[in-house]
Image (cartoon, rainbow, N blue to C red):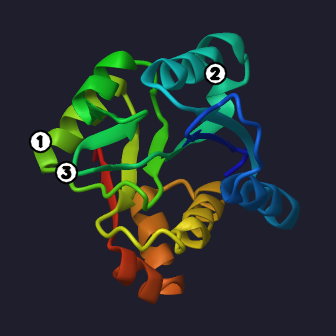
Amino acid sequence: MENETFIFCLEAVTDVEINTTTEVVNGLEKLAFAHGVSSIYKACDTIEGLEESLGALLYDDHNFKDYEIIYLVVPGQDNMICLHDYFYSLQEIAELFEGKLKGKIVHFSNIKVLDLASEEAQYFLDVTGARAISGYGISLPPKMTSMQLDFAFFRLCQEEEDLIDIVEELHQKHYEACKLLDFRLYHTP
């Protein structure tokens, strides 16, 4: 890719008032130092916090077009995310950000299994304008994360434009991890 792209990471935490450095923050810092992939990190503990953080990025950050990946580290299952013990469907999330994620890749870490029917994925992509939605079909035990595979995916997105090529190369370089976690990417052709 000609221009550097950035990651905007939103991580669900128990309480945003408690200032802690999470494993995700440490990982993003290492990714920046080792591979030059820049990111912005925000913690959220409610749907309002998620909406506010993405809204601030959309409306207040004049470099929003440079954020290719929205990295969501939020728990959930199937087509739902969970914040502060409340579940929200991806349909509700899509409607919150209607038309606002044009050209973005929305990537979920493995703490939320991404198991969408093709119609659900297409609805999310159509409503938000996102280029793709990706994640994993398998959740690992709490001590294990998808972070290394997430970051490998982000590095490939930095280097390559074509989604099919990115997924193929990810599988070639990290076949065992892709298979173990059941990496998935839904996109608009």
Most extreme residue toward the bottom, as rendered? 176
**Spatial distance from mark 1 to mark 3, Cα to Cα?**
8 Å
User: Going 55% across and 23% down the picture, which residue do you hit?
Assistant: 54
Left or right for 123, reference 163: left
Q: Crowdedness of circle 3 by 10 Å Cα count: few (<14), some, many (20+)?
A: some
- Residue at the image point whose x is 31% and y is 58% from the top: 113
Is the residue marked by circle 1 packed among few (<14), some (14-19), or many (20+) residues within 10 Å?
A: few
Task: Give how far across and how far down residue 161 sits, in percent.
Answer: 54, 53
Residue 63, image x and y in percent? 72, 24
Q: List the residue tagged with mark 1.
A: 119
- State the separation of the CA atoms marked 2 and 1: 28 Å
Residue 103 in sight here: yes
Q: Which residue is mark 2?
A: 57
Q: Compare marks 3 and 2 and give the one earlier in the sequence.
A: 2
C-alpha span from label 3 to label 2: 26 Å
Q: In the displayed structure, would residue 41 be above or below residue 167? A: above
| Amino acid under disc 2 | Leu
- Label 3: which secondary element: loop
Tag 2 secondary structure: helix
Q: In front here: 82 or 26?
A: 82
Q: Is residue 78 above or below residue 14?
A: below
Q: Amino acid at mark 1?
A: Glu
Asked whether the viewer can see residue 98, the reply is: no
Q: Where residue 89 appears, x then y in whole percent?
A: 24, 33
User: Which image quadrant is residue 176 in?
Assistant: bottom left
Say few, some or many: other residues with alpha carbon within 10 Å of mark 2 (under 14 / 14 to 19 / 20 or more).
some
Q: Which residue is mark 3?
A: 116
Question: Which x, y percent locates residue 6?
Answer: 69, 42
